[in-house]
Amino acid sequence: MLKLASELESVNAMGIVQSGCEALGVHEKPGIAQALGYADGAAFCQRLSEPGNPLHIGSCILVFGLMAYFYFFGGDGGSSSGGPSCSARHLLVKTEDECKKAKERIDGGEDFVGVAKEVSTCPSGKQGGSLGRFGKGQMVPQFEKVCFDPNTPIGKVMGPVQTQFGYHLIMVTERTGIGPTENKKES
């Protein structure tokens, strides 16, 4: 193990890290660096590639991990420079009647998060229905149609929406990269 570690240390880690950071555009995506406690992408990349940094091997692994994240999940690293993206909450139930009853409760003043925790059959229900950020092509078409429609108001409960999973109530909390609603957030 020590021999492998010493051989990996002799690899030009600085070049690998700098190349990886450039390929990812980390300098232009401050969200990654800020999430890790750095002021900006440049400071993050500089620290990872410093000679003598005990994290040379870890830095290479981290950069390749970030590259995989960007490739497979379309992550934007906290930036909206990628394609259209959306953040939303939803709740999922088996029947349209259950969905309408949940919507009546929310329209009557109950908190979406609380109702989702109580009635949703989706694992995200435990987090109040939060789906986090996602891009086009990551959700089923009926769901995506609501989320990426510029006419869907931010923060308004939409539904029932039927998919192969059941019936959803959907609340878009943020949307970027689509026309007139670009960069709007729920207040």
Image (tube, helix red, strand yellow):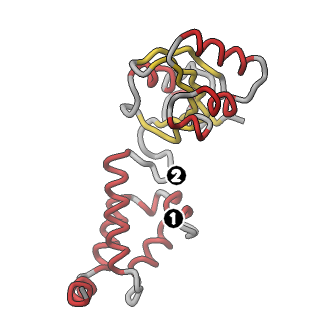
Q: Is residue 107 above or below residue 185?
A: above
Q: Is residue 119 left or right of residue 21?
A: right
Query: What's the residue type where badge 2 is placed?
Result: Gly
Identify the image quadrant of the N terminus. bottom left
Residue 133 pos. (x, y %): 50, 41
- Give the residue displayed 62% in from the left and 30% down from the top: 116
Query: What's the residue type where badge 1 is placed?
Result: Ala
Q: Is residue 47 above or below residue 130?
A: below
Q: Is residue 185 left or right of residue 32?
A: right
Compare residues 26 and 129 and report the one nearer the observer.
129
State the CA–CA distance, disc 2 to disc 1. 9 Å
Quadrant of residue 5 within the rendered picture: bottom left
Compare residues 15 and 187 and report the one nearer the observer.
187
Compare residues 170 and 184 and report the one nearer the observer.
170
Q: Which mark is residue 78?
A: 2
Identify the image quadrant of the C terminus. top right
Q: For the residue carrying disc 1, how many other residues have a C-alpha within 10 Å: few (<14), some (14-19), or many (20+)? A: many
**Residue with the most extreme top position:** 97
Q: Secondary structure at mark 2?
A: loop
Residue 54 pos. (x, y %): 40, 86
Q: Which residue is mark 1?
A: 33
Q: Secondary structure at mark 1?
A: helix
Q: Is residue 29 above or below residue 87?
A: below
Q: Is residue 37 above or below residue 118?
A: below
Residue 9 pos. (x, y %): 28, 86
- Give the residue displayed 45% in from the left and 35% down from the top: 84
Q: Is residue 137 left or right of residue 179?
A: left
